[in-house]
Image (cartoon, rainbow, N blue to C red):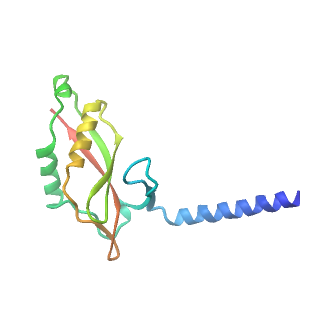
Amino acid sequence: MIKSLRLDIAFIVSLLAVVSATAQVRHVTTVDPYARNKAALVEVYEFDYVDVLPQFPGGEHGLINFINNTREYPYHAYQQKVQGRVLCSFIVGTDGKVSNIRVIRGAGDESLNREAMRVISEMPRWKAGKVGKTAVPVRVVLPIAFRL
């Protein structure tokens, strides 16, 4: 009984150490940036917790122009007059490359979700985000609107 009590106490102490360590590093998430079957994991900073934000070439104006010039309304959604906003997340790597594109909240029509992911996948390299003077991977959340 004493051995099991010691193991339980050791487990609780180690669990508390892990929880307190995670509470201090809320801005970093571990994700697999390439594929589900690979074991390569990367720590990704959240957008609000970096010193220098990742930036699209041409700034916000350039990003809006890129989305408007690249986005194509899916024929089926256009015919049925489906509108909406697709909220996507992606990672801007240390080299500025966009990866790990995901739909957080879809527009209700799968074709709009796929089109938003296609637009993001065609983005050129961004200027990487930085913590201090070190380039770090950063998760970016971007809404893409589809309006008629």
Give the residue displayed 31% in from the left and 31% down from the top.
108
> Along the horizontal axis of the image, is 40 left or right of 61?
right
Outermost residue, front side: 38
Q: Quadrant of residue 43?
A: bottom left
Image coordinates of residue 92 in percent, x first then y, are 30, 59
Q: Quadrant of residue 16?
A: bottom right
Image coordinates of residue 53 in percent, x first then y, are 29, 65
Image coordinates of residue 77 in percent, x first then y, are 20, 27
> Along the horizontal axis of the image, is 62 left or right of 136?
left
Relative height, residue 95 to residue 62 (above, below): below
Relative height, residue 130 to residue 142 (above, below): below
Relative height, residue 59 to residue 87 (above, below): below
Image coordinates of residue 106 in percent, x first then y, are 32, 37
Outermost residue, top side: 80
Outermost residue, bottom side: 133
Give the residue displayed 11% in from the left and 45% down from the top.
69
Give the residue displayed 23% in from the left and 43% down from the top.
118
Relative height, residue 83 to residue 63 (above, below): above
